[in-house]
Image (tube, helix red, strand yellow):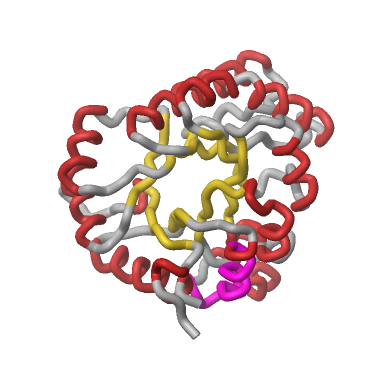
Amino acid sequence: MTTTPSQRPLNKVSIKWNMVEEPGLTITDKFLLLADLGFDGVELDAPNDLPMDEVLNAQRRSGLAIPGVVNSMHWKAPLTDPDPATREISIAAIRTALDTARAYGASTVLVVPGVVNAGTSYARAFELAQAGLGGVLDRAEATGVSLAVENVWNDFLLSPLEAARFVDGFDHPRIGWYFDVGNILRYGRPAHWIEALGQRILKVDVKEFSLDRMNSLGPWKGFDVELGDGDCDWAAVNTALRAAGYSGWASIEVPGGDRHRLKELKERFDRIAAL
């Protein structure tokens, strides 16, 4: 049985800015294209070099929302880098992203909390991530924009209960979780993560994943599958989100393309959101 849009937990759909690959379009043209295709919003990176006045004008003309901003520096300058100067760059970027998000009318900034690797132990990453994010909560509070921590392949916060405890450790209303459905299939079942994270989930990233392709061709090949054709149980995801009380944005994060490609992605999203 399918659901109407008003009954769906994923009832608003956005797309990442860099997925719009129709050639020769201005910023406003891209916004108008997405609105014409039925998208509700688009997420931009920040810090960025897009002229603020052009972005705001494109918003007004298209009616498209910018529900969230993605921190553009969390891989280049991780919050958990051993170098204090690099961590300062990361913190400054998050503060800029929060300011940009407020100007756009966005409610979240997506942040990767850190990376565990040979140079940074798990325990040290936990300590540095807590300190780094804690140090920008004042700006989050001042801007009214929330920090949304995302699960990525960063070898950090690998269980849903740990992820929930990480958020709860701040005891602050301006930090929550940006749940990426496809990313988590390498580690576990999305519905189980949703159950554990519950109302900590602020936004949802939508992508697909194939365990067969991962096992036979390598981990990254698992993403080479279209929405609805992989191993994500979207009906279970929707049920879990509904039980958690989630009702809001989903952002598609897959390889983009021209108008025809984006139209296909919107149609595929509508099918999985209705399950």
Q: In this view, does 107 lie above or below 11?
A: above
Name, please, the residue furthest toward the top: 85
Residue 194 image point, x, y percent: 66, 58
Q: Nearer the viewer, residue 262 or 234?
A: 234
* Residue 67 appears in the picture as rendered: yes
Residue 57 image point, x, y percent: 18, 36
Name the side, left or right, on which 252 lies relative to 38: right
Name the side, left or right, on which 189 lies relative to 205: right
Image quarter for residue 270?
Answer: bottom left
Q: Nearer the viewer, residue 55 or 1?
A: 1
Name the side, left or right, on which 48 lies relative to 87: left
User: Range of the magenta residues?
Assistant: 226-241
Taking the spot 32% from the left edge, 55% from the top edge, the residue there is 40
User: Is residue 42 highlighted in magenta?
Assistant: no
Taking the spot 67% from the left edge, 15% from the top edge, the residue there is 84
User: Is residue 237 highlighted in magenta?
Assistant: yes
Taking the spot 39% from the left edge, 29% from the top edge, the residue there is 102
Residue 143 image point, x, y percent: 45, 24
Name, please, the residue furthest toward the bottom: 1
